[in-house]
Amino acid sequence: MVNDEPENRLEVSISAEVEMGQYANFASVWHTEDGFVLDFAVITRPPQLANDPSSGQHFVSVPTRIVSRIRIPPSQVFELMKALEQQLTAYEKETGHKN
C-alpha cells in the first residue's frame, strides 16, 4: 500500500539572539496539569551557611537565577527523553566519559 500523504519535515530556524544559547549549571523539572516545565538556572554565588529565622535551623543557601524556562506538553516529554538518551550515548562513545 502506497502512502499518498507527503512527509512532514520541520524547517527549523533560530534567531541570532537565541543561537548563542544560555549557560546553565542547574536544572529543575516540574509539572502542571497542562504540561511540564524545565527551568534552567545558573548558580550566582558560592553556597553559604544560612539560618532559617522561623525554625532556627541551619541550611546551605545556594543562590540561583533562572536563565530560561521551557514549557512542553506531556506528549513531548517522551520524545525529549529519547533524544537526550541518544545524545548522551553518542557523547559517551565520542568522549569515553560515562557519568
Image (cartoon, helix red, strand yellow):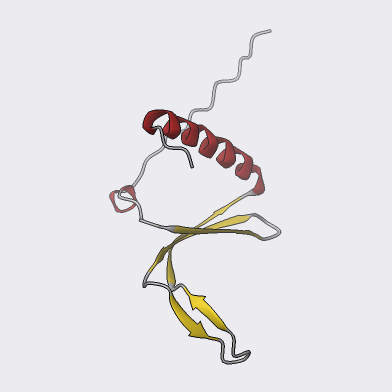
- Where 23 sits versus 59, above or below? above
Q: Position of residue 17 (x, y in %)?
A: 30, 53
Q: Residue furthest right?
A: 33
- Give left or right: position of 19 versus 54: left
Residue at 54% x, 79% y is 59
Where is residue 5, by image quadrant?
A: top right
- The percent position of residue 13, horizontal first and vertical second, equals 37, 40
Which quadrant would the N terminus be assigned to in this image?
top right
Identify the residue at horizontal 41%, vertical 58% (top origin): 25
Q: How many marks?
A: 0
Q: Residue at x 42, y 34 (%)?
A: 91
Instruction: Locate residue 50 relative to residue 73 in the image: left or right.
Output: left
Q: Residue 36's x, y, as percent? A: 62, 55
Q: Is residue 67 left or right of residue 60?
A: left
Quadrant housing residue 12:
top left
Single out the residue that lies furthest toward the top: 1
Residue shown at 43% from the left, 28% from the top:
93
Query: Image height check: is 14 above or below 40?
Result: above
Measured as percent of width and height from the top left, residue 7 is found at 54, 22
